[in-house]
Each structure stands twice: as structure tokens, then as C-alpha cells.
């Protein structure tokens, strides 16, 4: 089954404690992206990757890092999380003509 | 600035009561307009992609249409299982493949 897998689904952490949210896709898509979803603001792009070793900032990149060492994996790293990063996060992969496939989401709470 | 506005924010229908959701957009060089369904706590699920004004697509009780300034998602004789948040997104011109999302319409269908 074609899918995007994120882990963990839920995460509660404390301010300043580094964390990584993993994302993996099995569709051999070159393009992957991270979004965050907040009430009243909709989904906003954090970072994207056009291919292995090629990443770039989206609309809200502050406080986040990403890496793309393999085509299938695109982890999201929060080096020093803050409460304003409490949100619902989605990883997605894309191929032209086939559209976007989203993961099930990671609900992050930073206290 | 590229922007997507969805209306209404929330809609309550009786089972069998047809209606339409609106998505108006301003974008430089539309590459595609996407409709997604999102259930609580889950990732957006792809419904349709529309590429040019006049295009229409159907899937079960849903029909999406596109003009140069807006898209409509028509729901015919809805059932309670159609209850969800419906998201509209546009993909602008350029190489980023970014989706710009509206904030969604929360649809509740009562039996």
C-alpha cells in the first residue's frame, strides 16, 4: 500500500529538549514536505525537499531543521522546541500527476 | 500574494440535503486546485485535482468544479459519513510544488 508513515503519532516534551519526528514514504517520490496545522491558520509549509540532499525553507521554517539523506526518509528536527511549536504536523510526498499523499500526523505538545 | 479562502467555515446539513462548499483563490499561475477530506486526528485524504477553468470531477456524492477565481465542492444527498473537514488548496506556478491551503469547511451531516 502506498503510504507516508510518520512517528510518533503523539509527543509531549519540555521546552529545549531536542526531538526528531520521522517520516518515510514507499512511493519513490522525489518531492517531500512538512506542514504544520493550527486552528484558524490552516496547513502551512515548513520545509520541503525536491530530491536527496536538496532542501529549502517553506513559509514557517524558524525553529526547524530537516535532512534528506535518502529518497524515502525526511525527518523533521526541532533542536530546541518552544511552546509556540505545539501543533499538528504532517509529512507529505508528491509526484506530478499523482498529487500529494499525507501521513497520519504527529500531535506535538511542548510544555 | 497567493491566497485561498473557504466558505462557510462550518455547515450543518440534514441527511439528503444537498449543498455546496466554496473555495475562492488568488494565485499567480495556477498549476492545480486540490480538494481534500480530513477526519479528526487524521491526515488529509485526496479527493480531486482540477487543472483548468471549466473542469469538473465527480466521486460518489461529491462533484468539484473550477472557474478562474473559485472552485465549488457540491455534495448531493449527503450521508452522516460525509461529515468531515473539507480542505481546498492551490498549487502555484514555480518550482516549489507548494500547496497553499484554505482553513477548511467543517461539514456535519445529521441523520
Image: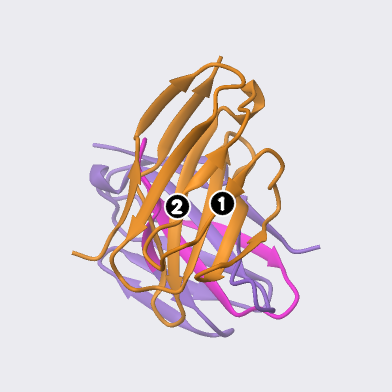
Chain colours: A orange, B purple
x then y, percent, for residue B95: 65, 78
- Magenta residues? B20-47
**Residue at the (24%, 45%) spot, across then down:** B81
Camera-side residue of A2 and B7:
A2
Is B6 positioned to the left or the right of A107 in the image?
Answer: right
x then y, percent, for residue B106: 46, 41
Would you say the magenta stretch is mainly helix, strand or loop? strand
> What subunit carries mark 1?
A
Whether residue B101 is visible to the viewer of this picture, yes or no, is no
Residue at label 1?
Answer: A66
Residue at label 2?
Answer: A91
Q: How many marks?
A: 2
Marks 1 and 2 belong to one chain: yes
Rendered image: mark on residue B53: none
> From the viewer's perspective, is the residue at label 1 or at label 2 nearer?
1
x then y, percent, for residue A57: 68, 57
Is A7 positioned to the left or the right of B50 in the image?
Answer: left
Quadrant where the N terminus of chain B is found in the figure: bottom right
Residue B77 vs B13, above or below: the answer is: below
**Residue at the (25%, 48%) spot, across then down:** B79
- Write down the quadrant of residue A95 in the picture: bottom left
Amino acid at each position: 500500500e502506498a503510504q507516508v508513515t510518520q512517528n510518533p503519532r503523539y509527543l509531549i516534551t519540555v521546552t529545549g529538549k531536542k526531538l526528531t519526528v520521522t517520516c518515510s514514504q514507499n512511493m519513490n517520490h522525489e518531492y517531500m514536505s512538512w506542514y504544520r496545522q493550527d486552528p484558524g491558520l490552516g496547513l502551512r509549509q515548513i520545509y520541503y525537499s525536491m530530491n536527496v540532499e536538496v532542501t529549502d525553507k517553506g513559509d514557517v521554517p524558524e525553529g526547524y531543521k530537516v535532512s534528506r539523506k535518502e529518497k524515502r526518509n525526511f525527518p523533521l528536527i526541532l533542536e530546541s522546541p518552544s511552546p509556540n511549536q505545539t501543533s499538528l504536523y504532517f509529512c507529505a510526498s508528491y509526484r506530478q500527476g499523482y498529487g500529494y499523499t499525507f501521513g497520519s500526523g504527529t500531535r506535538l505538545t511542548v510544555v | 500574494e497567493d491566497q485561498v479562502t473557504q466558505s462557510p467555515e462550518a455547515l450543518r446539513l440534514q441527511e439528503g440535503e444537498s449543498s455546496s462548499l466554496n473555495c475562492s483563490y488568488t494565485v499567480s499561475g495556477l498549476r492545480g486546485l486540490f480538494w481534500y477530506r480530513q477526519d479528526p486526528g487524521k491526515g488529509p485524504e485526496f479527493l480531486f485535482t482540477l487543472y483548468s477553468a471549466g473542469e469538473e470531477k465527480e466521486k460518489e456524492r461529491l462533484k468539484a468544479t473550477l472557474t478562474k477565481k473559485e472552485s465549488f465542492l457540491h455534495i448531493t444527498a449527503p450521508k452522516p459519513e460525509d461529515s468531515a473537514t473539507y480542505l481546498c488548496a492551490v498549487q502555484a506556478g514555480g518550482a516549489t510544488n507548494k500547496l497553499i491551503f484554505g482553513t477548511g469547511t467543517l461539514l456535519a451531516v445529521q441523520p
